[in-house]
Image (tube, coloured by chain):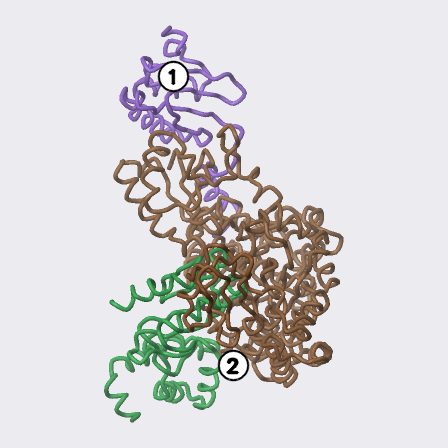
Amino acid sequence: MKSLKELEEIKQRTLDSVNLRQDRTGGTRVVVGMGTCGIAAGARPVLLAFLEEIKKRNLGDVTVVQTGCIGVCRLEPMVEVTLPGEEKVTYVKMTADKVKRVVAEHVVNGQVVSEFTIGAAE
Amino acid sequence: MSTSILQDNKEKFAELQRIIDEYKDKEGPLMLILHKAQELFGCLPVEVQEYIAESLDIPLTDIYGVATFYSQFTLQPKGKYTIGVCMGTACYVKGAQAVLDELSKEIGIKPGETSEDFVFTLEATRCLGACGLAPVIMINDDVYGRLVPSDIKGIVDKYRGR
Amino acid sequence: MEFYRSHVLICGGTGCHSSGSGEVMETFKSELAKHNLENEIKLVQTGCFGLCAVGPVVIVYPEGAFYSRVKDEDVSRIVTEHLLKGRIVTDLLYHDSVHEDEAIKSLNEVEFYKKQMRLALRNCGVIDPEKIEEYIAFDGYKALGKVLLEMTPEETINLIKASGLRGRGGAGFPAGLKWEFTAKAQGDKKYVCCNADEGDPGAFMDRSILEGDPHSVLEAMTIAGYAVGADQGYIYVRAEYPIAVKRLTIAIAQAREAGLLGRNIFGTDFSFDIELRLGAGAFVCGEETALMASIEGMRGEPRPRPPFPAVKGVFGKPTLLNNVETYANIPPILLNGPEWFQSIGTEKSKGTKVFALGGKINNTGLVEVPMGTTLREIIYEIGGGIPDNKEFKAAQTGGPSGGCIPAQHLDTPIDYDSLTQIGSMMGSGGLIVMDNENCMVDIARFFLDFTVDESCGKCPPCRIGTKRMLEILERITQGKGEEGDIEKLQELGRSIKSSALCGLGQTAPNPVLSTIQYFREEYEAHIRDKRCPAGVCQALLQIIIQAELCKGCGLCIKACPVDAISGERRSPHVIDQSKCIKCGACLEKCPFKAIVKG
């Protein structure tokens, strides 16, 4: 160890992988519906795609959780994305490819991908 | 006597010499060496103490003094399984004495003794720090907690057969 | 970068380890592999969460789900339901961690944690103690960097002095002063030592810190080395703590590799290294001069002070000796400033204290509270009260050096001085709760038995005096007590206190003196009425059949191993007291609860 800068680098490198363990209020929250219907409709690949994109883009401040059935089985796999201080947005009939756009446009740039939302499907 | 032990355990004494060489230049090496020697021989018989005394060039009485001062050093061989009954306060107020009495009755030896077949050594130990599970016993590295005297027979039987 | 959507924290402290957390960890590993979840979910073995009573404890983030008493066979449900499908397995959650609407409480809302303030335990149960990066991620070694690069040794010592930190090992000596004495002492070589010889029965906070956050101790010792001018440190740790020894060994190797121990730390010309020294089962080695003799490889016998260790310590050189918990407080004080630390606690005792809660209490485990918290808050709010709603009788603090605190002092704010005032002491932090089924004479006997066994034998007051006290106590508990015994105990106690060589001898009579002070009538009952009110002292017990409840079924006659019970069928039976061996077998068998101890 030669300097505080070096120490800070180790800290930053590790922080993203441990701050999940603190009670957090801020940050973006991604909820994937993983009820039986969701899993049957392909929720696992969607979940994995989210993890992949987050890893690729170094998004430390995103929490990905699963939940049970969100309730509209015919529109599964469903995903809810909540940016800090904003309304929840529900995406339906998700696929791994759609995830890429949601992360790039919504999670990173704050632009809701309206064509995938539940409003567009109804 | 002393020479025959040396000859019977040539390999172990060679290992002891290696340990002594490794530690002798450290500050205050005696306890470090005794810990390792006990791991190696299972106890610290007088021949081992003599060997260390000669190698380190310190009086045998000093070594005997240290080996008998600390309760974890033992001059006699122990049983295959050492049963430690925690007598810390938390265990005591939750009935450790009854557990110890039951063990003593079940194995037929008093605390501090080793059974004739060298299977069990029974000890009343200091706090093991698992107070949340009081009362606790430890058989070698296995911990048993929240015990009542009627659990004892079953636990001891598990080790008898091995 | 690594990204895991979920972290599974498994407690690897000694408490949970003993109740099987090792197997639980292995099962999680294989279950996660079975469902291909290894790259999404991170398994972390942490230090103690504190709630040992309900171990093994597993916490799953980000939800913060607190699973308790997790058994091997529960793991596959947690993996398939919670980790795969996102449905928390509510029936396995710790009962107090769920709201009535089934929403999960954050840990700070759980009754056990609500009033706690975790400073010394800040990283226990949060980080993986075997990974130095995780310690660094939570600001580890930042205080060391700050001290080495921005502060002089004098400034460092002044800051610790200003914080008001007192030694957590028992006596409560101001830590900053000790540092200053050692720094000012003349010597070509100096040492920094850590007392991790936690010998008080029922105390395990130091072990939990070493197991859960070993780097905090290494960092603080290195800071102390810089402040007092030492280049070598020793940690004297009990051999009874194998997990702590293992984690410390790993931590020292990692710190050396990262250049945080060794030569030219942070590119300065300061060098410092740390070695472990193992105890071998001698309680007296917790006393500072005995501990130093033991580090030198000799019999751990105390010697008179002065000279104090700060002047003449290990190998005759000036030595700074602090306890584990004291060191664990150092890094946050340096990072947050002395004013912050001053704002916590009472007027004369700053900061927090870790207590090991044990005995007759629901939430046995480790708690850390601000100084000034009352015993009532600790026992009834954090500790969840006494099992079966039994009545509180006394709390024992300070181990064999401390005393018993009765119910009338439940509302005393706890700090160093208040505890001494009511005849006990802080000690290292063991807190054993006792109810009406614990006999105070027997407890005093228990501690004296411990002291006699552990007395090193060097000074007569301790070697002979405590032995005489024990003999009197044994007589009393066997029903052979005499008038004047209490006064004899008090007189012996007072002279041992004033004449023994070391702190252990001087405090050895405390358990006896404090129980006489608060529970004198219990001693008198033993001596005059030959009666043990708590029903503990075997020799004074009688097992009696209450005639009005006995239906004469004969079950007790069959159960009695010595044929002490007789009586016609359907008429009340009686126990022949001269034959009875008080085994209690009849008591368990009686279907009408007609047999009682008295």
Q: Chain of mark 2?
A: C
Residue A34: give x, y in percent of width and height.
34, 25
- At a point 53% along the width and 60% down the height, the residue shown is C204
Viewer-side label of 2, 1: 1
Q: Few, some or many C-alpha atoms within 10 Å of disc 2 (few <14, some 14-19, many ≥20)? A: many
Q: Colour of chain A?
A: purple
Q: Position of residue C220 (x, y in %)?
A: 56, 57
Q: Amino acid at mark 2?
A: Arg
Q: Nearer the viewer, residue B147 or C58?
A: B147
On the image, the x and y values in percent for residue C261 come to 48, 59
Q: Is residue C390 visible?
A: yes
Q: Which label number is shown at residue C299? A: 2
Looking at the rendered structure, the secondary structure element under dot 2 is loop
Chain letter of mark 1 equals A
Q: Check disc 1 and report the residue beneath it.
A: A71
**Residue at mark 2 to residue at mark 1: CA–CA distance:** 72 Å
| Kind of element beneath mark 1 | loop
Q: Amino acid at mark 1?
A: Gly
Q: Is C1 above or below relative to C306?
A: above
Query: Quick one: quadrant of the N terminus of chain C?
Result: top left
The answer to which quarter of the image holds residue B24 is: bottom left
Q: Are marks 2 and 1 on the same chain?
A: no
Q: Which numbered marker is on residue C293?
A: none
Chain that is brown in the image: C
The crowding category of the residue bearing disc 1, from other C-alpha atoms within 10 Å (few below 14, some 14 to 19, many at least 20), is: few
Residue B101 appears at what percent x and percent y? Answer: 44, 71
The answer to whether residue A53 is left or right of residue C350 is left
Chain in green colour: B
Is C594 drawn above or below residue C5 in the view shown?
Answer: below
